[in-house]
Image (cartoon, coloured by chain):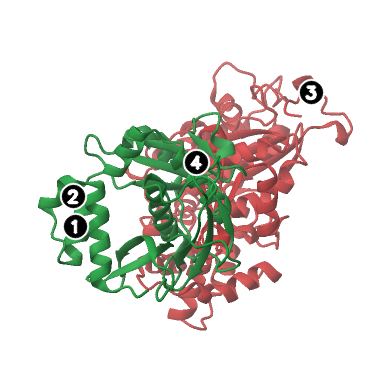
Amino acid sequence: MSLSQELLRAEATRRILLSRPDLAARIDPSTTRGLLAAQHLVDADEPGEVLAAVVMRRFDPVSWVRGTCEFALGLTPEQAATWRRSFTRTVFLAGNPENLRERFSFDHVAEDGSAAWTSPAPAAASAPLRRLLKLFDGTQAVPTHPAPVVEVPGRPTRAPVRRDLYLATAGVTVAESLVSLNHLLVESVMDGLLAPGDRLVLRPVPRPAGIATPFAALRIGAERANPDQLRCFAYLTEGIDHDQA
Amino acid sequence: MSTVHLDRLQAQTAPTRDRPRVLLAPITITPTKPLTLSHLKGLLWTDVMYRATAQLADVTYRYSHTTYNVTEQTLGFWEHLDRTLGDVDYSGWTEEQIGECYIRYRADEHRPPPSAFQPYADAVEQHGWTHPATSRVLELWTSLYDRLGLHDPGLREHQPPGLGLAEMIDRLDGLGMCLDLREHGGPVYLDATRFGLPLRQIVLPGGRPNYLACALRELIPLAAEHDEVVLIYDRELEPDYLLLQRVLSALGPAVRRVSLGRVPVAGQVLSARHGGWQGNTVGDLLDRLTGGDTDDPAALRLGLRLYFIAVLGQGQSQSFRDDLVVSCLAKARKLLATTPERPDASVSKHRRDHVYVDPYRLTSALLARHQPKPGPELISAVFT
């Protein structure tokens, strides 16, 4: 389906109001800048604001997507609600979880040890970790092949669904992709779009546009070259029938 | 093994293979500027440590410009010289003239693309090429070393590091101390977070190594061949040397750190990259001290060691004073003119739990009033 600026603005507004209904009176959903300003109304250092920290030795898409879903599924409803109010803010740090386990406790560690998560908490809680490590940074895009299939871990609580997850790669670094994927995945878990047993096909494409299957969720941000324009960074499709797949 | 028993060290007459093996690895001075008084202090400390420790151990004094010429600091300077001056005959240039160019380079806001450094990096890596401006600096330094009685550890020799960059990263990875984000277009970090030390970038995004990566390429293969490694460095580099100590210790030897403060001039510590050395280079100092026809090379060498080691000490609390240097030279002349009745030929007591001889303790003993003094042989072997 085609993604117009009107559609992107409407979806972005929907996400903001789902996370922070209290901001309804303070944002201007008619312009891109007005929408983007909403996220800056929430300062990470304000009382009540929380952020999660992810320590990553490398970005392994399959392991990381599984780990991210499993981490989000493991949060209590209260933790999830508080994190949602902070727009699921997350900091990605370069580090080897194996070297840090004696000094720091993680709430979840990827099966292959390539990443570890701390639950959403006030910024001060992750300050020692952030002082020791550096932001996970890389100038390259995520690798575009092959298209890996990821199964959301855990015992299914409903009939599993298969979805495609399209990820924008044109002009996007791996560090930026992490941000997009993370918001989309954890919020989709919170909204029940993703559940244990579901299968995701990760499809990196220059731009997720003109995709036949309608979307269930989008990750939207500003165009780098033109901050008045919105852009889709990640596109989670509706469930795809197994027979069709 | 990490400990060498001191009783093993006493046997100076024992066969060579029984002597402990010590690696002295001082930080190198980038050959792009004049030698300053702070540099001189480090050189004299290292020289006394080397020559005194060699009395009781097999010492490797590792000092390779080849290893560090691939850092951006040096490659960038060479590229700047060639871009701004072109083909120039540097053979008659002074350290100061080249140092002035270096100051201009550091102030230059033009940042060439990394590809501009590649021909220089390749030439260094493949055959130890050195830019003629740096060759000229090293030629001048060699003659200063000669006047100062410093052992030349191979200033102008091609001494490539034992490991290539990729091999070094593999070895670090094997120790569980490497975080490599190159596949994502990111940097390589030295990871000693297990010990509570912060991540430290050693290869920049794009692949250029910094001086710490160069040090690892050189010291990882050497460390395992020695019983003790002594790292001598400027105090402000302490965090990097704590990291280096962790890596090298993991390979077996006892690793000692000796940090040295700089030499303030009129209360100011100036970095050579910004200048501030004008009138206070090592060459200037030697010219002031050696005028006239009363030159005594031995007294000059001993006197400078007394001042820069015993008087200034390890820290940097005292500003440089010409008058104290002159009185150290007078003291040196007196020491050289008298032969003690019962000379003390031992250097081994000037140590603590380490193999290397502490230059401060050894040199201070020369100034102490009521201690046995070393005889002429030891003074000549270590101080002149």
Query: CB of mark 1 within 8 Å of CB of mark 4?
Result: no
The amino acid type, in three-letter code, at marker 4 is: Thr
Cα distance, mark 2 to mark 4?
Answer: 37 Å
Secondary element under disc 2, as helix, strand or loop, is: loop
Rendered view: A172 above or below A179 = below
Q: Is residue A184 left or right of residue B246?
A: left
What color was chain B assigned in the picture? Answer: red
- Residue that carries the numbered disc 3 in the rendered image: B10
Q: Residue at x 61, y 36 (%)?
A: B246
Query: Which quadrant of the structure image shows residue B128?
Result: bottom right
Image quadrant holding the N terminus of chain B, namely: top right
First along the sequence among labels 2 and 4: 2
Q: Which chain hosts label 2?
A: A
- Residue that carries the numbered disc 2 in the rendered image: A41
Mark 1 or 4, which is nearer the eye?
4
Secondary element under disc 1, as helix, strand or loop, is: helix
- Residue that carries the numbered disc 1 in the rendered image: A37
In the depicted view, which residue is nearer to us: B239 or A187? A187
First along the sequence among labels 1 and 4: 1
The amino acid type, in three-letter code, at marker 1 is: Ala
Query: Which quadrant of the structure image shows residue B224?
Result: top right
Mark 2 or 4, which is nearer the eye?
4
Q: Which chain hosts label 1?
A: A
Query: CB of mark 1 within 8 Å of CB of mark 2?
Result: yes
Cα distance, mark 4 to mark 3?
Answer: 75 Å
Rendered view: A194 above or below B125 = above
Q: Which chain is green?
A: A
- Residue that carries the numbered disc 4 in the rendered image: A157
Mark 4 or 3, which is nearer the eye?
4
Q: Residue at x 53, y 43 (%)?
A: A156
Residue A45 at x, y = what percent?
Answer: 25, 40
